[in-house]
Amino acid sequence: IAHAEMPSFSGAQSPVKVRAAAALVAASLFLFLAHSVRPADANAGVFTYYEDSFRPDEGSRATLEVGPARWRDLLIPNNQCGGAGQANGHGQSPVVIPAANRDRCDTDLSGYEFQQGTCTFDQLLFLIVANGLIVGPQRVPGSPNTLNPDLVCELGRMKIPGDDAWYVATQFHIHAMSEHSVAGSFYPAELHVVHVREDGSSFAVFGMFIDQDDDADADGDDDDDEQQPQQQQQHHEWFEQFLQGWESVERQTQEFCATDPNGSGFFSPNRIFRSLQYRVQCPAVGAGVDTANLQFVDEEQLLPIGWNETKVLSVPVFQRPDWPEGLVPSIYEALPTDSIDEMPDGIYTYRGGLTTPPCTELVRWNLLSKPMKIGSGQLDRLLELILCFVERSTCRHSTVANHFGGTNRPPQPLQGRQIIHRCPSQSVTNGTEATTSSAAAGGGVMNDPLGPPVQAYKRACLRIGFGNQSNCVAIQFQPWLALLWPFFIFAISIVVHFVLSRFLPALPYTAMMFLVGAIQGVITSYNNNSNDMLTQSTLMWENINPELLFMVFLPGLIFGDAYNLDIHLLKDSLWQCLIMAFPMVLAGTFLFGLVGVYVLPYGWDMNLSLTFGAILSATDPVAVAALLSEVGAPPRLKALISGESLLNDGSAMVFYRIFSQLWFFGLNIQGLGMDIGVAEGFAIFFRMSLGAAAIGIAFGFALVLILHWLDQRFSHEESIVQVTAILAIAYLCYFVADAVALTSGVISSVACGVIVKLFGQQRLNNKETMKSFWELLEHLLNTLIFALGGVVWGTVVSNSDPTRLETFDGRDWGYMFLVYILMMLVRFLLMVIFYPIISRIGLKWNVREMIFTVAGGLRGAVGIALAISLDNELRRDTVSGDPRREYTTQIYGITGGVAFLTLLINGSFAAPLLRKLGLADSPEKRKRIVQGFERLLIDHQVQTLKDLVAKDDILCKVNLEVIVKHVELLKNVSVTELHECIWPTGGVESGATSSALPRRAGASSDVFRPVDTETKGLLESLFENEKDNKDDEAELDQEMLKEQRKLYLEVLRVAYEKQCASGELDVRKDFIAFVLLQSVVYSEDLVAQGNPLHDWKVLNDRSVPLSSRVRNAAKGYQSKCTKKGGETFFEDSMESTDERVRVHQAIAFVRAHTEADRVYREASSTSGEGALESKRVLHESAATVLQAKKFLSSIEDIESIASLLMCKILLHATSEHILYLTKEGFLKQQEAEEYMHHHIIKQLKKVDERFK
């Protein structure tokens, strides 16, 4: 009866022995408990209300999943938790009572009978177990511990409608959180009185919801501060008598554990469980117990049925509550009224099963629709007894409640079963005779609602805390809330990047994300009990499972870094990296172990100090790797720092596993930790390192083979599949190495990444896709892990987390800075000791590079993940208030602070240090090199200008003075020189000389070349000879013509997109590109209906309404925004601005059609099938271009607009050339960004302002 809803059976007091039921139920209980003795055997029949997996025995990394979703797989006989096929029509329980049943009465309450039991309080056995509270009759003294014990009394009896047999009450128990719900509304608890039929053929449960009586609490005398809590606690007298009995049992357990903190050590089914609920803060076991005056008595240990061994324990004397004399009040007095006929709401009945394994489907459920209401103080005490359950065999909190404080099975499907709402007879007012008990059992449903609807309970919460500090919070987290926090962090990271890139480029991004997380952690810790979604999502991530943390973040980060290594440099520096990653890490771990034991005042033992040292040994070059390339540091320096970081991440993880297991073992936490000897430690080290390398190599070659199969280089989809394969293998490699083979997932990921880079890189169809994807993934993972590290650190240093007793005070801040200094000194000492070896092998080394390597050993993602894992591992296996949590709190407080200091200080001063040591390129020389490339940019701009003037009808007559004024690189070129370069003397046609001279604004608007003879002929044949057109129409294939028009529009779309790419159309700042592209879409629709090309007309029809809306919005904005003196921000009238937009639009239209005509003419057939249709399409295009040119001819200021447009094109072309020089290695990324920001972007803004 300790775990399942299995009744004890009546003995001498019962008129009929219920042997059949005893055989069925107790056999299940026996095997359930017997399997619990051997927790390493599969799932061993144990179960929990949380879905998280856990390790069943010491030293094992195998896990069990025994939450409600897996109860069907429990190894217990006659397990029906997966359903018994509904052969008996009962089905599973609990269920949701639908609103339709709540709001109607189906029949009356006839058929119920109740009899009081024969027990006194002293004859009852009170139990607190892993999933709730139980009370039932004791065994007859001296009766054997068998499947069918004799009981000293009987709790009560009842008859139910449709059955004349008596059902004997054998026990009742209480679950935290109601298992059933009415229309989806839950209650804080639920009480079940379990009955067994006299012949043992089935069960009946008389259940009731438990809720807080807020009205009764409010009725108390607010002026009487001393009496108000007592009134709340004593509100329900019947329940208070039983509550005191359970509290006496809890008091006895606390006294026992205060005298023997390690527990009895004897078998109990609960000893492998550990509390995971964190909604109630439980006091430390044995806290506040005065052991000096305790009296003890020998008591036989409560054993599982069939257990052959016995044990007598010396336990504190049970302190009997002040129970009344005589028989126990009838258990049916818990009804919310004195008589069942007076109940205003009635009883829900249905057929179901037990709500705990084996979920036997032989239960007739009878649920009171009105809850039993108890005082708020009673409710707090009740929940504390269940959720703070202490197991005597281990003396630790071992409730199997889920994380949210519930021992309730999730609702099960009705699957067609009927729920009958039975109401008092006076509620039946339609004149129909109440149905008989037999008819009621079969249904007897009445269609009309009878009586008022059941009260709508708004309460869907759980009271957290006790006494006057209790709060009502959400019942449980929703799993989808986990998605909120990471995307919130991504949104914040955008702001962080913008601020850093624009204003604070010297600060490392990861350090700032850690700071952002720390701020959020402080806010969350002060708002811990809030119901807002962001707080709940943050708490879910803060308490992330340690193994899940590793498997989400490390494979992506480690594999990506390994793949990006320079393989040739790594090969030459391998022995140097191995020395820094293994002997140096081991030496550093032991040195920091000495610091933890002899310097820090926290009382850490050597194993915990060595664990601390392993965490601090993991370096992260993420903040300096990019910097080394930017400043031109020696390649071997980057290779050594990156290689050391990757390999020492793996070695640090191995050492962390070994020493943390030793420390956990010393804590004497059941199922946590291993006792590892020296020889075994070396064996584990080599197995985890060499075994992981072998697994990584195997997965690497498998991935190379997959990439070889996916070799269709011209298939974009196959390139995506290649990236998918790499991502999948990277994570599977880590998972297999870490979780299956129990080796180092980090080392396996490094080996896999190196193999893929060495043998698989050339098999990639698109290296840019691979590079871009992995850069994105690393950015996202680094953003999350540093923010998460900051959240946990902020929670620790805020001293507001109710689950932590340790405070991070001024002394701890001082020791954090001391550890940072000592860490740098230890790293420097180790580098000096190993310098003679490292400097003579591989890529060699010098003193300056050694000094920077000391400073560049930042602590980052892996160290933060290890510290979070250690903290969460202990928090998962302990409860709030456990003093052992102080150790991991101290470690993470210091580790997180040190990581932040290295990122902020070392990362920020890395560039100046490189230059000071002479390891970076000379700034003056690089500046001269960059200035030398300006000549290339000038030549590129002039050539671009020359090409456009020579080819383009619109841009051939630009004003060179305007161009020189707005394009900074051309300022040192005179207009005459530029003119001579574009139109050399004697190099222009006769008649073009005058038009080639520099022009000023206001000059002749005739800027178009004469229409060529061919185009004139096309236009004449199209518009002047309508009869011939009609004759041609008869010869054309209309379907072919339609397809040719569609083809032309696709070519035209590409021409517009080229203008967007070149910068002529700025998709970010105006609607011109959008309108032009939309004109293609609308034209496609018209062409599909058989219409000719009329995209100029479509463009005008669609752009005028849009520009009008823009103009109206701008006018509204203009009325609000004024300069000093009352001048508006808008220099020109809105009508003029609208006209310029249309001019720009028309120029883009003409240039796009000119380009599309050229491409289409080259690709189209001039003879044969489709030739006439192609010619017709070109006719239609020429007609639309002519209309646009006529519009442009009417514009007086066309020259200045064309000149400014030319400026935009030149500047964008320059930016593309800068990108090309950067990609080819002539310019560094930072140099290109600075040049773009200070020259190109600023000039573009000026041109845009002038354009407006």
Image (cartoon, rainbow, N blue to C red):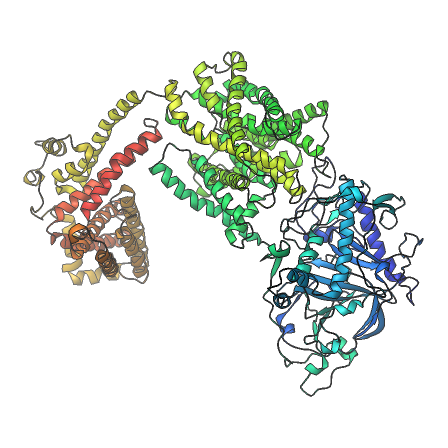
Counting from the top left corner in percent of width and height, residue 901 is at 47, 31
Residue closest to the eye, 662 or 446: 662
In screen coordinates, is 523 left or right of 1120? right
Q: Is residue 548 above or below residue 681?
A: below
Counting from the top left corner in percent of width and height, residue 271 is at 76, 44
Residue at image position (60%, 68%) is 457
**Residue 547 sits in which quadrant?**
top right
Quadrant position of the N terminus in the picture: bottom right
**Residue 869 sits in which quadrant?**
top right
**Residue 88 sits in which quadrant?**
bottom right
Residue closest to the eye, 247 or 774: 247
Residue at image position (16%, 43%) is 1203
Counting from the top left corner in percent of width and height, residue 56 is at 73, 41
Counting from the top left corner in percent of width and height, residue 1217 is at 28, 33
Q: Is residue 1098 above or below residue 929?
A: below
Name, please, the residue furthest toward the bottom: 431
How many tags in the picture?
0
Q: In this view, does 110 lie above or below 822?
A: below
Does the rendering let one see residue 1008? Answer: no
